[in-house]
């Protein structure tokens, strides 16, 4: 009898290690195949300077503004975006009668009672070529008196501390 | 695409107007070719020759004002100078063939000058003149006053170059019965109607003959920006800026107070005698504004500064008046209870704004307002509350205020 003992354990270990490596290699290959595209994209991704990023943001903002303003009916927070006027079922009547000569900003800046608005319309009719508004006059005055009514502000308003943009000022010595 | 949609909107609006008010189409007959309902164009816009940092009150007609902290320069840069348009600026300007006609009941003759003739025939002069819109500060009146709601920025001071108005008027000949001059410009009425003038104001003959009353072609040694009246305008310091006609084509010497557009009714007029806020005032009881009141503006720092109590806060600004000079400039950090003096510069010439500076310390942390007030040669100073209420909200010279937080 051959008493020489053959120790097979190292062989087994080698075999298992090789199998493990094979599995890992397969996994890596599989992962590479799946992620090939994103990795490529990442490697080729251009880098932008701060300036370029700002410029891109600006272009996006302009595009957004454009899309908003092309959207005739867009209303945000109760404001008709296209004109800046307060949204209302009768808004179209006001736009039709009041925005051919000047922008709607001249209207939204002003505040008056119904009579005050009536006086402005009469002034424009007598001196600025505004025509007779017919049956629409009442509708327009109702709209203006409702949305652009005066607020009581006393002899002088407080500074609007809510609206002020506070900033740290470092005064050089 | 955009155009199509606008046209569609225009048509449908006109149609709906027609349907609702019969034959009375309010505006469409005045709607010029290619110009649709511009009031609908509410996009952010920039304007030729003007910085995007200005505040747009109205884009048709163009009315833009300058935030106080952008007026810190000794002379206002052209792109920061405010714009008050009543109509539409001329669209084509032929500088080589531009003429100025002088005529009127009280002119000895009718005479025309080309720009070149004005430049070569009369002494060329430069003055630093402050121009302020009569309605600057209108937004503060209560009850609210009608018109563009200017806050503090319808003012600026630049170096104007041109000729003296009196030299040109004398060259034409002024009859002894002359009372007023009136101007016409090349701008058009908002409605597009050729029979309407957007604005045609003027000044009493004595004002027209002052040394500093000018016909100008340059602002800070450059062409006047289109929106400020290129190629030629009048400039009268100390009077509402509306007297200083832009895109100037004609001056008439009148034997009575000029009665052009915006000279009559309530325009650029205040009640002849003081009235209670909100009072109804008849047109016949309204008087033309002449001299503008003494006023000042804090241009540094921008309102909203947060500082450490250990810091001294420098402030700076300008003050102006229609009288000879500003003689005193003061600030208060305790809501007018005590006033301290500022360092004040001399005036370059009459109607130039003067500059002030001071260095402030604050006694303890908290919320402060810096108030500024100027006093002129005649002893006039600025109100802290709103001065005399008037229907159209002119002449608000209440002291300027900025907010400061001290930590």
Image (cartoon, coloured by chain):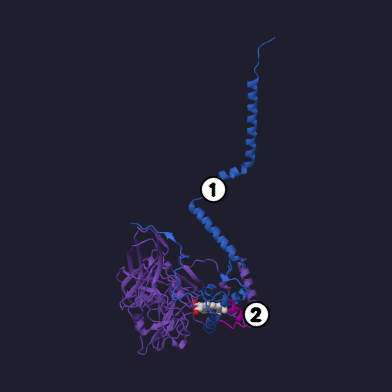
Chain colours: A blue, B purple
Instruction: Classify residue B329 as left or right of residue A1.
Output: left
- Residue B38 horizontal/vertical position (percent): 56, 72
Around disc 1, counting alpha carbons within 10 Å, would you say few (fewer than 14), some (14 to 19), or many (20 or more)? Answer: few
Q: Position of residue B367 (x, y in %)?
A: 41, 64
Question: Is-magenta flag for residue B157?
Answer: no
Q: Nearer the viewer, residue A150 or A79?
A: A150
Left/right of residue B263 with respect to residue B294 in the rendered view = right
Q: Is residue B128 visible?
A: no
* Residue to which mark 2 is pinned: B18
Provide the residue designation for mark 1: A46
Location of the N terminus of chain B (image quadrant): bottom right
Helix, strand or loop status at disc 1: loop
Query: Above or below — where is B359 with respect to A93?
Result: above
Please provide the residue range marked out in magenta: A128-143
| Circle 1 chain | A
What is the x, y in percent for residue A25?
63, 33
As drawn, the residue found furthest toward the top would be A1
> Is residue A135 inside the magenta stretch?
yes
Question: Residues under labels 2 and 1: Cα distance?
Answer: 57 Å
Residue located 64% across and 17% down the image: A7
């Amino acid at each position: 009898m051959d008493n020489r003992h053959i120790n097979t354990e190292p062989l087994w270990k080698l075999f298992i290690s090789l199998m493990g490596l094979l599995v890992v290699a397969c996994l890596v290959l599989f992962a590479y195949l799946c992620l090939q595209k994103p990795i490529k994209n990442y490697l080729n991704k251009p880098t932008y300077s701060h300036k370029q990023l700002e410029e891109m943001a600006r272009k996006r903002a302009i595009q957004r503004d454009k899309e908003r303003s092309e959207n005739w009916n867009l209303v945000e927070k109760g404001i008709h975006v296209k004109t800046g006027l307060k949204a209302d079922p009768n808004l179209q009547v006001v736009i039709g009668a009041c925005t051919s000569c000047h922008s709607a900003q001249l209207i939204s800046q002003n505040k008056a009672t119904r009579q005050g608005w009536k006086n402005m319309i009469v002034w424009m009719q007598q001196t600025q070529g505004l025509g007779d508004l017919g049956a629409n006059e009442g509708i327009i005055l109702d709209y203006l008196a409702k949305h652009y009514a005066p607020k009581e502000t006393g002899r002088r308003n407080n500074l609007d501390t809510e609206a002020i943009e506070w900033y740290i000022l470092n005064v050089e010595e | 695409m955009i155009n199509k949609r606008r046209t569609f909107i225009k048509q449908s609006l006109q149609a709906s107007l027609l349907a609702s008010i019969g034959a009375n189409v309010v505006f469409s007959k005045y709607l010029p070719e290619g110009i649709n309902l511009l009031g609908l164009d509410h996009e952010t816009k920039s304007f030729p020759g003007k910085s995007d940092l200005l505040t747009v009150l109205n884009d048709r007609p163009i009315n833009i004002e300058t935030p106080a902290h952008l007026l810190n320069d000794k002379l206002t840069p052209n792109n920061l100078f405010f714009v008050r348009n009543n109509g539409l600026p001329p669209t084509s300007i032929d500088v080589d063939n531009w003429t100025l006609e002088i005529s009127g009941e009280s002119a000895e003759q009718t005479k025309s000058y080309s720009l070149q003739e004005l430049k070569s025939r009369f002494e060329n002069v430069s003055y630093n003149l402050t121009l302020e819109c009569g309605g600057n500060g209108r937004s503060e009146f209560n009850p609210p006053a009608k018109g563009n709601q200017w806050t503090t920025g319808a003012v600026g001071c630049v170096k104007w170059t041109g000729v003296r108005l009196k030299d040109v008027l004398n060259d034409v000949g002024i009859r002894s019965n002359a009372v007023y001059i009136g101007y016409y410009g090349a701008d058009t009425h908002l409605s597009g109607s050729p029979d309407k003038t957007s604005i045609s104001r003027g000044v009493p003959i004595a004002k027209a003959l002052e040394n500093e009353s000018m016909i100008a072609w340059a602002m800070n040694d450059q062409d006047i920006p289109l929106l400020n009246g290129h190629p030629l305008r009048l400039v009268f310091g100390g009077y509402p800026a509306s007297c200083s006609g832009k895109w100037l084509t004609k001056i008439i010497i009148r034997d009575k107070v000029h009665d052009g557009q915006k000279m009559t009714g309530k325009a650029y007029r205040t009640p002849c005698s003081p009235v209670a806020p909100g009072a109804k005032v008849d047109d016949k009881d309204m008087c033309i504004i002449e001299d503008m009141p003494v006023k000042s503006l804090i241009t540094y720092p921008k309102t909203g500064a947060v500082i450490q109590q250990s810091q001294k806060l420098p402030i700076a600004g300008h003050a102006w008046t229609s009288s000879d000079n500003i003689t005193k400039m003061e600030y208060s950090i305790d809501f007018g209870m005590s006033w301290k003096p500022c360092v004040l510069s001399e005036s370059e010439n009459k109607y130039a704004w003067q500059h002030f500076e001071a260095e402030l310390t604050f006694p303890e942390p908290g919320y402060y307002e810096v108030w500024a007030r100027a006093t002129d040669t005649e002893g006039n100073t600025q109100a802290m509350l709103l001065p005399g209420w008037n229907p159209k909200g002119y002449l608000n010279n209440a002291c300027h205020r900025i907010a400061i937080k001290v930590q």
